Amino acid sequence: MTECLFYEIRGRALEKVLADLLEKSLQRGWRVLVRAGSKERVLDLNAKLWTYKDDSFLPHGCFKDGDAAEQPVYLEEPDEDAGNPNGAEVLVLAEGGTASDWNNYQRCITLLDGFDDEQIEQAKTWRESLAAEGVDAVWWRQGDKGWEKD
């Protein structure tokens, strides 16, 4: 069964949280597919992942680069939802990214802007529907002392 995790981000930039999660996934040998809510946001995340740290390299590509199957981390065009082009075990949905195929992954992570009420409400509705299906969906909220489980 797919492990579903929601991260309500309030104190750090989404790109930094995403980069941390991508690093941890790659350390575990997992491939990752990232979907964001707009083409512009995918391109923005792609650019920021190249420069998020001076002393580190995060191998990734996006839809404009091609060769999805070769990418350990692949940022997909928002409306693509065309399967799993890089054979990922982890699906990351960022800022409005959606997926009808979320249950085809070992882990589905949803990153949320904690100050966007509409985004939070949509995610809570999805979490409730997952719970109705018997899926354990864990919600993490960024607090003063780090990540707190809701």
Image (cartoon, rainbow, N blue to C red):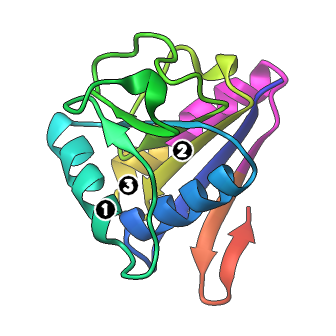
- Residue 48 picture location, percent across and down: 27, 63
What label does residue 117 carry, if any?
A: 3
Q: Nearer the viewer, mark 3 or mark 1?
A: 1
Residue 96 visible? The answer is no
Q: Which residues are magenta?
A: 123-138
In the rendered image of this protein, does residue 55 appear above or below residue 91? Answer: below
Mark 3 neighbour class, 10 Å CA radius: few under 14, some 14 to 19, many 20 or more: few
Are dots 3 and 1 in contact, CB under 8 Å?
Answer: no
Secondary structure type for disc 1: helix
- State the separation of the CA atoms marked 1 and 2: 21 Å
- Residue 88 picture location, percent across and down: 60, 29
Going by the numbered disc 3, the residue's amino acid type is Asp
Q: Nearer the viewer, mark 2 or mark 3?
A: 2
Residue at position x 39%, y 77% from top?
53
Q: Which residue is mark 2?
A: 110
What label does residue 50 carry, if any?
A: 1
Residue at position x 67%, y 61% from top?
140
Exactly how many numbered labels are in the figure?
3
In the rendered image of this protein, does residue 94 appear above or below residue 55? Answer: above
Q: Main secondary structure of the magenta part?
A: helix
Find residue 115 and report its image quarter: bottom left
Is 126 colored magenta in this rendering?
yes
Going by the numbered disc 1, the residue's amino acid type is Trp
- State the separation of the CA atoms marked 2 and 3: 15 Å
Relative to 26, 86 lies left or right: left
Relative to 72, 28 lies left or right: right
- Residue 81 picture location, percent across and down: 40, 15
Residue 22 visible? The answer is yes
Secondary structure type for disc 3: helix
Secondary structure type for disc 2: strand
